[in-house]
Amino acid sequence: MMSVETICVREVDVARPEELAQTGAQRMLARKVGTLVIVNRLHEPIGIVTDRDLTVRVLAEGRDPSQTTLVDVMTRQVTTVSAETSVEDALRLMRVGSFRRLPVTDRAGKLAGLVSLDDILDLLSHEFRDIGRLLVDENPESVVRDWARLAEPPSVPSA
C-alpha cells in the first residue's frame, strides 16, 4: 500500500493567520497556486484558504481584502493526514469530507506536504496505464507466441 508521503508536494505555500486576505491572494497569484495552508508559529496546520474561499468569503460578502485577515476567512476545521496515511485512506477522507486537498503532517504534527486529488488521480492514471500495458503484453496469444518462440530450435546459418 502506497503512502501519501510518496506523492505529496513538499513545497507548500503557507501563510500566518494574521496576514491580510489581499496579501494571501497576491501570494497565490505570484506562486501560481490556489491554496495556502495556514500554520501557527510551530508550523502546524491550523487552517486552509483557497482561491474560492477568498472569492466567496471576502469578495462576495463585500469585505475589504486589505482589512480582512486570513484567520477570518480560512477553513478552521482542517483535516490532515500523516505522511504514513495510505493513498486509499486519503482518497476516502477527501470523498467523505468533500475537499480536494489534505495537508500532510510529520510525526510531530508539523506541516510536511500537501496531497491533492489531482496528485492521486495522476498516480492512478499511471497505474491504470501500466496495467493496460501488462494486459496487452500478457494476453493469451502473446504468451503462446512467446512460448512457441522459446521452443523453436535455434536456426543454423546455411553455408
Image (cartoon, helix red, strand yellow):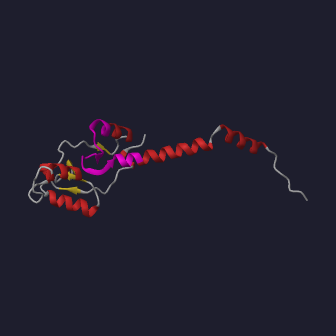
Does the magenta segment cover residue 100? yes
Place of residue 46 in the rendered image (x, y in percent of width and height, measured from the top left): 18, 47
Left or right of 84 in this view: 109: left
Q: Residue at x 36, y 45 (%)?
A: 4
* In this picture, residue 144 sits left or right of residue 62: right
Q: Is residue 25 above or below residue 118?
A: below
Q: Nearer the viewer, residue 138 or 105?
A: 138
Q: Quadrant of the N terminus?
A: top left
| Count of residue discs | 0
| 85 lies above or below 35 | above
Part of the protein shown in magenta = 93-121
Percent x, y of residue 147: 72, 41
Q: Quadrant of the C terminus?
A: bottom right
Displayed quadrant of residue 79? top left
Using residue 89 as the reference point, say whether residue 64 is left or right of it.
Answer: left
List the single residue furthest toward the bottom.
Answer: 30
Res 120 seen here: yes
Instruction: From the viewer's perspective, tell me whether residue 49 is left or right of residue 86.
Output: left
Please name whichever residue, 49 or 55, is drawn nearer the observer in this view of the structure.
55
Please tell me which residue lies in front, 145 or 56. 56
Residue at 57 percent across and 45 percent down: it is 133
Residue 5 seen by the camera: no
Q: Nearer the viewer, residue 106 or 141?
A: 141
Q: Residue at x 20, y 59 (%)?
A: 25
Query: x, y (%) of residue 132?
Result: 55, 43
Q: Position of residue 85 (x, y in %)?
A: 34, 41
Q: Quadrant of residue 67?
A: bottom left
